Image: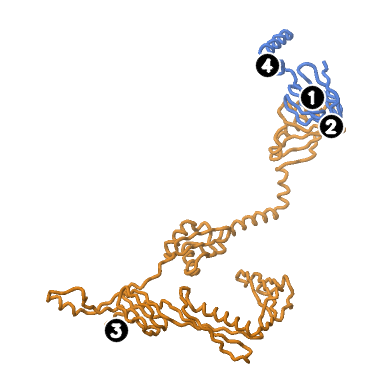
Amino acid sequence: MGNKLFDQVGGTIKVALKGKNQEKIINMASSRGIYIWDIKKNGDDLNFKVRTSGLKALQSISEENDYELDVREKQGLPFYRNLFRRRMGFFTGALIFILALYIMSSFVWFVEVDGNKKVESSKILLTAAKHGVYQGAAKWNFSRIEAEEAMLRDLGELSYVKLDIRGVKARIQVVEKILPKTDISGPCHIVATRDGVIEEVLALDGQANVKPGDVVKKGDILISGVVFPEKSPYIVNNDEEEKEEEQEEPYTVRARGQVKARVWHEGYGECRLHEEKLVLSGRKLRKIYIETPWKTFLVKGQREKTYNLYEQKIKKRIVKSPLGDFGFFQVELKEKIKKTRDFTEKEAVKLAQERAMKTLARKMGDNTKISESRVDILSRPSDPILRARISVEAIEDIATTQPINISPNSN
Amino acid sequence: MEKRKDVIRQAMAEFLDIPRDLVLDLPRVTLVGRNELYIENHRGVIEYNLNRLRVNLSRGYLEIEGNELEIKALMADEMKVTGEVLAIKYMD
């Protein structure tokens, strides 16, 4: 029975045998090891199949015994050669296509940087390019792991670099180092960040310049980093020699401490009795264009249709090429409508207050304790607009460090 | 002489429990349904047409009657026949 696959590879031939007593040929063929199959009588002829390799032997047998042998059909791979020759162009085209696809896909066409916040992308890209990962680089010219390691070495700000190559896209994923805040290491003062009345002073290092109840302005020194040595009242000096040392020069320290002060914040808000507002209506229009250097085509949506009032959003996907920019962009229009609202005076006051409170909250820090607050209505009853002001008294830490310049002139 | 050899062989096959077709050169005929016929240990084709196939055996021959008979494969001592088999006869 043989193997169908090998028959196809070697090629099979269907023949017709003419003559009398054809069984003789069948027996001779099988006894000589010529494999024949699918033997079927067709009228006076006997049709059967034989492998290409056995055809010659079969022909000589039939000739010797005065039989006529006709080749009827050829099957298998060797006989496809003709077809191949006829359609040479097609097959070479297919081959070129596959080859081109392979070659084109073995270059990096896009480089993306992901995960960076402080380090600029251009800097990362430049470093990557230095180690062989750039637009148009052949994939076999760099090693992924080596490039990763080299980039990590070159960019000290990064703690992790991953180079992910997917098809023709190289994605550089980075994680930045979180560095501790650089503290002032030299001597410094503690100064006020804003005006206020001192409530509490706690000097851990340095000399306090203010005491509770003092009024300070922004920039005033609260705790001085310049310390004038004092004679301690608790240490009694017996030696005469040490008295000379007391006339020491003032020295500087890094002032540390906490200064709490009473400060004032103001928030302002207003509300019209008759208020107009633009609101999204929920209706949308979408237009998709295809951009080529010569013309932009509209693919979806109507070019002319717009709304009176709208918000516009444009999404672009553009590929730059020597001929110009190709790509598509999508314009989304969201309709806006005017909405008017009328408030009673009571409602307006409440709204103005709320808004004032909001602006106030933005100004103040999180850890501010409010000790007193006052609301003023600034507008007259006849005004179409209601203005509210909230004044707040709060106790806040107003200390901040300021380095001391130690130069021969200033100290 | 031949006969005595056969008797000895047969006795041996029985005694040693060996399949007879191996020892005695007997044909093995397998019929699957009525459309597929396998013959092993044949000695060539004597006559073939669509309705009748005669296969030579070591002793006598086998006559197969049927419709649309076709020798699907033919090897030195094995063959496969397809088509509608109506009768299988042993002839001397």
Task: Give the amino acid at mark 2.
Answer: Lys
Near mark 2 (Cα within 10 A), the count class, few <14, some 14-19 or many ≥20, is many
Specify the colour of chain B: blue
Task: Tell which subunit mark 2 falls on.
Answer: A
CA gap, disc 3 to disc 2?
Answer: 123 Å
Residue A179 placement, left or right of A233: right
Please give the name of the residue rendered at 48% of the width and 60% of the height, measured from the top-left corner: A161
- Camera-nearest label, 3 or 2: 3
Residue A41 circle label: 2
- Camera-nearest label, 2 or 4: 4
Describe the element under mark 1 as helix, strand or loop: strand
Near mark 1 (Cα within 10 A), the count class, few <14, some 14-19 or many ≥20, is many
Asked if the residues shown at circle 2 and circle 1 are in contact, with their CB atoms under 8 angstroms apart, the answer is no
Applied colour scheme: by chain
Task: Tell which subunit mark 1 falls on.
Answer: B
- The first of marks 4 and 1 along the sequence is 4
CA gap, disc 4 to disc 1?
Answer: 28 Å
Residue B45 circle label: 1
Q: Which residue is mark 4?
A: B18
Residue sitting farthest toward the left: A240
Task: Give the amino acid at mark 3.
Answer: Ser
Q: Quadrant of residue B27?
A: top right
Please give the name of the residue rendered at 70% of the width and 55% of the height, measured from the top-left corner: A89
| Chain that the image shows in orange | A
Residue A86 placement, left or right of A235: right
Residue A410 circle label: 3
